[in-house]
Amino acid sequence: MIRPITGSIIYLDNHLIAVVKPPGLLTQPDRNTDESLLDQTRQWIKEEYNKPNNIFLGLIHRLDRNVSGVVLFARTSKAASRLSKQFREGTIKKFYRVIALGKLEERHTTLVHYLRKEKSLKATVFPRATPAAKRSELSYEIIYSLEKNSLLEVSLRTGRFHQIRAQMAFIGHPIMGDIKYGAPERLPNQEIALYACKLVF
């Protein structure tokens, strides 16, 4: 039994649906559970439009389980193909709000590193090109800064595994609650202070 949709629908038309994923919920099902935002959203569409048969809903991108924010689904195969192409080509801009530990000095900067996904499901960061590591680029701007924490808006230029989490930790400012990358304490529900706030295309 699929539970009612736990995210908020913020945009809907004949081609797309954008849903805010809460922390703790998978974007798509894995081997251990079939409870996911994809299934909840598909079930909501079936009930809302009284569609008894299975319907198409294309997954365009993903958020980590402990990350919240906007997830975009395609309602047609044509929309899925076009959006997937845009994501691959980097023409869809992704923005995140992040609470990083510590006080960052530069108001606006770009980080370029090389990330390698490990079998431990963690990313290793290298300052220079390294075999099997992929070039990873992001920019951030400080919105508000205190002595112990900084609120940032992050723009991804590439979309690597755990990219924001790993790069921020590498420069000494892990994301609040992200104990996997060096934060000292968890947040409730294993959430981390990383929110996918905007997609521009």
Image (spheres, rainbow, N blue to C red):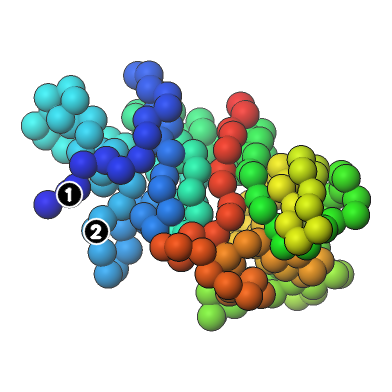
Instruction: Quadrant for residue 166, please give it.
Output: bottom right
Can residue 69 be seen here? The reply is yes
Residue in the foreground of this view, choosing between 134 and 17: 17
- Check disc 1: other Cα within 10 Å, few if <14, some if 14-19, many if 20+: few
| Mark number displayed over residue 34 | 2
Q: Quadrant of the C terminus?
A: top right
Q: Is residue 66 above or below residue 45?
A: below
Residue, disc 1:
2
Instruction: Quadrant for residue 163, please give it.
Output: bottom right
Residue type at tag 2:
Asp
Q: Residue furthest front?
A: 147
Q: Looking at the picture, how far across and down is residue 84, in whole percent?
A: 51, 39
Can residue 89 be seen here? The reply is no
Residue at 48%, 49% in the rendered image:
68
Q: Looking at the picture, how far across and down is residue 32, in whole percent?
A: 27, 69
Specify whether 152 is left or right of 74.
right
Residue at 51%, 31% in the rendered image:
82
- Quick check: marks 1 and 2 in contact, CB under 8 Å? yes
Specify whether 3 is left or right of 90.
left
Separation of disc 1 and disc 2 at Cα? 8 Å
